[in-house]
Amino acid sequence: MTDLNTELNTLAPTEISNELNSDTPIMAFAQLQLAAPLARAVAEMGYESMTPIQAQAIPVVITGKDVMGAAQTGTGKTAAFSLPLLHRLLKHENSSTSPARHPVRALVLLPTRELADQVAQQVKLYAKYTNLRSAVVFGGMDMKPQTLELKRGVEILVATPGRLLDHIEAKNAVLNQVEYVVLDEADRMLDIGFLPDLQRILSYLPKQRTTLLFSATFSPEIKRLASSYLQNPVTIEVARANATASTVEQHFYSVPEDEKRHALHQILKSRGMKQAFVFVNSKLGCARLARTLEREGLKTTALHGDKSQDERLKALESFKKGEVDLLVCTDVAARGLDIKDVPCVFNFDIPFNAEDYIHRIGRTGRAGAAGLAVSFVGGNNDARLVGDIEKLIKTKIELEAVEYDEDAPDIRKQGRINDGRRMYSHDGESKPNTGGDNGRSGGRAENRGQREDSYAARPSRAPRSDYGRPAQVARDPFFDKPYEPTAVGEAAAAPSWEASAKPASRSISANIKHKVKVAALFRAE
């Protein structure tokens, strides 16, 4: 191990910020001389050559230095920090069943539940041939199973900040022996307000530790966070900051709001796309769009923050298995999710934050594959947001027009979405009410005439039979008799129900008890 560290020290400069080009050699995993259990797991997963972020970050992390890494999403940042951490933690490996022999030594913090679950699965695959234990804790799930797993002891803990604080306050997680901390997608954690939680969590950790910070973008806030918690970090940037992947083909179409669904259908059909992400800005809009696309014949599921964790995991699983065509989602799915072979990403709504655009389109074109990113630009507000994206990616954006097929049906005239005009079917075609005076006079008369013609053309119906009516019930003849006055003697007599009634007794309160005669034991004198 000492020889390996000595050899790798020569590969770890204090700052690596130059952009890689095609002449930069990509190292193979075999050159890293990883421990045998890790090398076996990596070989089984089919890893051969490293991505640029892995080739630069893994040797530096193995030496124990703090790292501030930036790379485009989908370039393998998870393996870039997981493999060297596991390699260094093997010195603590043991087969003891005592929880005291398995304290938390590595902490990985992530912004979303789905990303935490994905990273935890990858760590388990890398450590499958070791005795190192790992666990994941995130919100939306019952704490009891998580508590039992933490009580048994784990070396690698993957968590979201909120749920981790719950376990810390419940004394389920003790972090006084943590040696390595990873802040993955740190910019997203700051965007959604996790900075106070991060500061509280880091206050529970030892001062002497190795801190790794990975993100797809480097904002001024991220740099301030790094200066506060990282000690002489090695900066690794394998591409220009805030750059999009070169394998993703990007298109911006000028489409009115009421034509976006029609444009989506047209692009899916013309490009022959089988699956795609569809990103929107609101939870309510996400649910509504998913229901509408489902009615229009596309297998669709929704993913947003108002769904329970079980529903979110089931939606992701069905999309991964290819059971649904479209995953309509908010930015909760924009970070880190690794779903292979997704050919297209639609920005149904332009994101409010320009950096989210980079993360959204990073769901396609992963691991060097080709991808397509389509964005629909509607009103004036969208034009301003597109201007922010232009400034961020430093690329001029040209708006295009969608070319519709002439024989394609208009999606706007299908389904249950009301566009504000009444539609009448005539000769197999849908025609709007186009009469004069906004359809109030001429159009109304024309439609009345069409209805009268259609009524006249209807075939005559046969008279209805009474087979469905219930049978007549015979009436009691008593009720058909005329009124007969009562006799004088019968009228004076009391009714039977009154005659049988008991005579009223003397009014005595129910609380007054009758005197009971009791035999006296002694005679009174």
Image (tube, grey):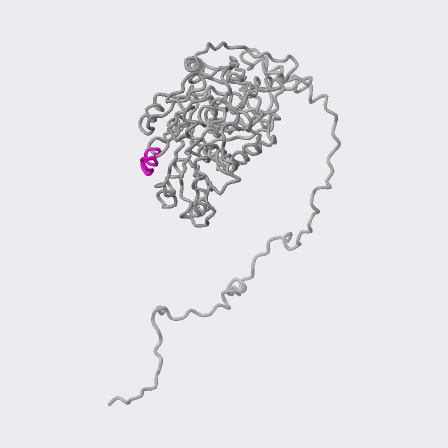
Question: Is 515 rendered above or below residue 370?
Answer: below
Q: Is residue 138 visible?
A: no
Give how far across and how far down residue 483 sits, in percent.
Answer: 60, 53
Give how far across and how far down residue 502 sits, in percent.
Answer: 46, 70
Residue in view at x 38 percent, y 21 percent? 15
Position of the C terminus by quadrant: bottom left
**Residue range corresponding to the magenta coloring:** 197-208
Picture quadrant where residue 81 is located = top left
Give how far across and how far down residue 280 sits, in percent.
Answer: 48, 24
Q: Magenta stretch: residue 133 in it?
A: no
Residue in view at x 35 percent, y 82 percent? 517
Q: Magenta stretch: residue 204 in it?
A: yes
Position of the N terminus by quadrant: top left
Residue furthest toward the front? 3
Left/right of residue 415 with respect to residue 124 in the rendered view = right
Give how far across and how far down residue 292 sits, in percent.
Answer: 56, 26
